[in-house]
Structure formats: structure tokens, C-alpha cells
């Protein structure tokens, strides 16, 4: 057939809506079906209670602090949903009668069914939380939550989800199709071993959060802000001289708490531009091959960043700067809280979009600068410095004039140590999740015994 591929399916074996689109019969999907065919298995609808999140308008109930409201993007890259950075809603909104069906429980698996279909997170606490209708809520009844989540993240789970996805422009996975999403039933100790591996990953994930919070608390206290009580008068005024000097007329910028914060942090007379140099290392697309490209959507709330592989020509139209190990990149688009990241050693030569300022620390260690830029009060300052427009953005010049952190050497080393411990725990957590997923695949491709041996070798 001249290099073309074809699949033949008997009419009697078509799924219930008689799908005959080419995507449904892709080679990898048929291979997954064939490998799962001889195994004892059950479908997700039989293993779980299936529902989805809130269908009603909720944006008017968003608040800065409250009850987590998870959306489709919050499960991307967050196996444990508590590590995401969701929106929050009021307790009153959470307790509305129509919201109760989407209240989350520990062990729920949140599967994205619109947009980034197939991404998922595991709910790991009983703390109040809810989610949008772009997430399916799979509440395990006769399967370990960790096993279900791990299988759905494996290539056999993902291929099934991709095959069941419907729609051309914005695809979706229908809840009614969960009875065609099959999960193997293993007879050995493998499920318990997978669950234990995931829980060990979870323990390291907790260490990530604890060490991050420790670093921020150490720096916050060293800056003299631990017991700071900002003034909140009902009314206040500012002189025209100050207004014209700053080029600002908005009331928020002249709020006493903001001015007092700026004065307090500026006491040492040092600005960010004194401790870090902006890296403006441009690249020539004609002299380079493909690039790993970092855009704002690649930044995680934990201070790390992913990337996507693009051609030099595409990078030339989208990217501005090289980034080097130890650089700290921070988003100029505001308000996007805590969107700063440290470039890792293996990201040397990556390029980033023009939506970032790249800072090369000169008088402080990168981990301290990163922690400082992620402090909520500093994020608030950056938000206020953003120019007023449809897409507010802070300029590089304004970033460089922000007050800089001045702390003693012992505090700096303690902050750096906590950040590095957090980074190590994150790597271990990811490695364990990858191992659990690989064990699932080994069990399908080889045997349960081989999968158990693989996991046992991790402990050796």
C-alpha cells in the first residue's frame, strides 16, 4: 500500500457509537488493546464511582485564600494535587447544595477530560477541596487509588484515554466511556507494592513542601517581616510630588502598607540590580540547531521549569534569551504569583520567551534570590509595579530597582540548604513515580514477578 497503514475491524466489534475514524484505529492503540486482551481486567466504571466537578459559574467566588478549587491545568505535572497552585473559593460557595457532589475525598483520582486530556492527580488529604467539570472524579471502590492513578499514567492507560477521546477542535473524554477504560487485575502483591512506592514518593513530596516553606520562613524572618503588622487605614493620602516622581496615580501603590514595606526593605540601600545582572545573551538561529524553549506555561509553582523542543527557526520567532545554570528567571507578566524559577545544571543553553527577565546572581546565591522573588509580599510588589493594561507587565528596569534582600551568611546558607534539600526530595519523588509506572508496564509486557523484582531492586 505504498507505505500506508490500514486497520480492519469487524462491524460487530465496533464500540457502541460505531466509531470508524482513523484516529480510533491508530497502530499504537490497537497494540495496547492486543496486549491487554489476554489479561484479567475490569473497567474504570466498575472499579470506581465516576462523576465530575462543578458545572456552575464560580469565578465571582474566587478569593486569595480559602478552599482549593482545582481546574484542568492544576493536575498537569502534579501527581499529588496538593502540590498544585489552584484558585480558592469561599466556604459559602463550597457549601452550596449543588457543589456537594463535587466535594473531594482522600483517594480520589482527578482525571482531566477536557483540554489536556489524560493528565491526572491523586487527592492525598481529606482537607476540604473541590474541582471544575473539566476534571473527572474517579472515587475508587475496589482498587487501590495509587494503582489506578499509576496505571492511567502508564502508556497503557494513556493510550486508552487517547483512543477514547472525542472531538476535533477541543477534544473531550466522556464519563460514559469509562466502561471502556480497562485496568488489569493483578493476583500477587504487586498492587500493594505499587501503592507503597507511590506513598514513598508522596513522603518525599511532603519534604519538598516542608523545605520550601522552611526556606521562605527563614528569609521572611531575616528580613524582619515575621512580626510585621502592616497598617490598614480606611483612608490615606499621598503628595503630588510623590505621585509625579513615581509616575503612579493608582491608590494601591500608595497604600501605607506598601510604602512601609518598600521603606523597610530598602533600609540597606541595595536594589536587585546590585546583586544580580540581567542576562541579555541573544542567540543566532542560523548558527544553532534545535532548542529547548521555556515559556511561561512551563514554570511550576515549586520554582522549577520544564521546556519544549523547538526548531531554531521557531525559537527565533518566540524566544529572546539564553539561560544558564544558576540563572533565575522571573515572569514579567503580572499578576502571576510566584512564577520564578532557577535554571538547573542540565538546562544550560536553553532559551526562554520574552515574557521573562533573566537574572544572573552576582552577590547572592541563586537559591536565595529565587526564594526572595517567590515570597508573597515581593510578588505583591511586582504586581503593583506592573503597567496598567489588558496584560499588565513589569519592566526589567522596575525589577532591577526593587529592594534587594540583605541577610547574614548563616541565614543565606540555611536558605540555600533548604532549597537544595527540597530539590533533592523532588527528584526522588519523581523517580519513585516513574518506577511505579514502569512496574505497571513490566507487569503487562512481561510478568507480575518481573515487576515485583524490578521494584525490589529499587530498595537494594
Image (spheres, grey):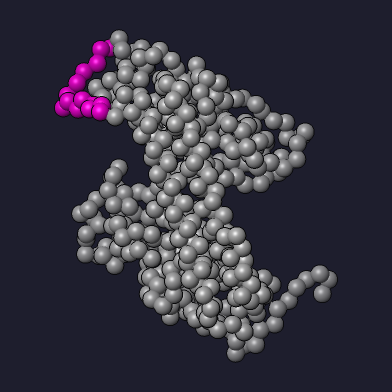
Image location (x, y in percent) of residue 233 = 17, 25
Extreme-top residue of the structure: 241
Image location (x, y in percent) of residue 406 = 42, 20
Residue 448 visible from this viewpoint: yes
Residue 79 visible from this viewpoint: no
Residue at position x 82%, y 74% from top? Answer: 1
Residue at position x 31%, y 49% from top? Answer: 88
Extreme-left residue of the structure: 234
Q: Which residues are magenta?
A: 227-240
Image location (x, y in percent) of residue 70 = 38, 55
Q: Is residue 430 above or below residue 253?
A: below
Q: Is residue 132 above or below residue 325?
A: below
Decide whether residue 321 is among the magenta residues: no
Q: Quadrant of residue 50?
A: bottom left
Main SS of residues in magenta: loop
In this view, the residue in front, 120 or 333, is 120
Image location (x, y in percent) of residue 346 = 64, 40
In this view, the residue in front, 413 or 309, is 413
Q: Is residue 296 left or right of residue 250?
A: right
Residue at position x 37%, y 16% from top? Answer: 266
Q: Is residue 36 left or right of residue 417?
A: right
Extreme-bottom residue of the structure: 12
Residue at position x 48%, y 37% from top? Answer: 419
Q: Is residue 372 above or below residue 237?
A: below
What is the total number of numbered labels drawn onto the structure image?
A: 0
Q: Quadrant of residue 343?
A: top right
Q: Quadrant of the C terminus?
A: bottom right
Extreme-right residue of the structure: 2
Amino acid at each position: 500500500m505504498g507505505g500506508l497503514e490500514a486497520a480492519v475491524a469487524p462491524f460487530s466489534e465496533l464500540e457502541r457509537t460505531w466509531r470508524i475514524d482513523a484516529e480510533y484505529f491508530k497502530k499504537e492503540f490497537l497494540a495496547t488493546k492486543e496486549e491487554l486482551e489476554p489479561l484479567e481486567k475490569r473497567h474504570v466504571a466498575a472499579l470506581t464511582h465516576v462523576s465530575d466537578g462543578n458545572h456552575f459559574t464560580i469565578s465571582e467566588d474566587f478569593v486569595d485564600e480559602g478552599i482549593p478549587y482545582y481546574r484542568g491545568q492544576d493536575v498537569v505535572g502534579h501527581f499529588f494535587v496538593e502540590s498544585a497552585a489552584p484558585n480558592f473559593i469561599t466556604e459559602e460557595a463550597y457549601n452550596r447544595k449543588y457543589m456537594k457532589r463535587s466535594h473531594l475525598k482522600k483517594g480520589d483520582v482527578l482525571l482531566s477530560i477536557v483540554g489536556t486530556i489524560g493528565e491526572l492527580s491523586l487527592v492525598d488529604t481529606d482537607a476540604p477541596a473541590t474541582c471544575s467539570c473539566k476534571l473527572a472524579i474517579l472515587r475508587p471502590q475496589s482498587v487501590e487509588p495509587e494503582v489506578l492513578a499509576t496505571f492511567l499514567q502508564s502508556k497503557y492507560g494513556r493510550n486508552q484515554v487517547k483512543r477514547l477521546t472525542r472531538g476535533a477542535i477541543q477534544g473531550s473524554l466522556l464519563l460514559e466511556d469509562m466502561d471502556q477504560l480497562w485496568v488489569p487485575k493483578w493476583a500477587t502483591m504487586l498492587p500493594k507494592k505499587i501503592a507503597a512506592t507511590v506513598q514513598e514518593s508522596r513522603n518525599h513530596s511532603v519534604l519538598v513542601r516542608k523545605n520550601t516553606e522552611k526556606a521562605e520562613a527563614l528569609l521572611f524572618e531575616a528580613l524582619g517581616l515575621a512580626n510585621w503588622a502592616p497598617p490598614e487605614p480606611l483612608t490615606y493620602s499621598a503628595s503630588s510630588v510623590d505621585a509625579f516622581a513615581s509616575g503612579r496615580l493608582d491608590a494601591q501603590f500608595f497604600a501605607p502598607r506598601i510604602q512601609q514595606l518598600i521603606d523597610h526593605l530598602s533600609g540597606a540601600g541595595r536594589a536587585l540590580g546590585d546583586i544580580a545582572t540581567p542576562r541579555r545573551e541573544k542567540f543566532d538561529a542560523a548558527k544553532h540547531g534545535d532548542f529547548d524553549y521555556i515559556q511561561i506555561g512551563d514554570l511550576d509553582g515549586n520554582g522549577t521549569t520544564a521546556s519544549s523542543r523547538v526548531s531554531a527557526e521557531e525559537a527565533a520567532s518566540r524566544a529572546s534569551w539564553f539561560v544558564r545554570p544558576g540563572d533565575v528567571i522571573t515572569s514579567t507578566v503580572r499578576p502571576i504569583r510566584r512564577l520564578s524559577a532557577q535554571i538547573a545544571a542540565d538546562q544550560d543553553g536553553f532559551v526562554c520567551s520574552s515574557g521573562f527577565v533573566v537574572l544572573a546572581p552576582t552577590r547572592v546565591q541563586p537559591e536565595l534570590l529565587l526564594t526572595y522573588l517567590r515570597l508573597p509580599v515581593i510578588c505583591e510588589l511586582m504586581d503593583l509595579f506592573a503597567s496598567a493594561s489588558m496584560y499588565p507587565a513589569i519592566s526589567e528596569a522596575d525589577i532591577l530597582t526593587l529592594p534587594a534582600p540583605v541577610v547574614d551568611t548563616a541565614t543565606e546558607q540555611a536558605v540555600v540548604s533548604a532549597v537544595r534539600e527540597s530539590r533533592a526530595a523532588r527528584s526522588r519523588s519523581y523517580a519513585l513515580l516513574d518506577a511505579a509506572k514502569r512496574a505497571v508496564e513490566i507487569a503487562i509486557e512481561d510478568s507480575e514477578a518481573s515487576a515485583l523484582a524490578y521494584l525490589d531492586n529499587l530498595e537494594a
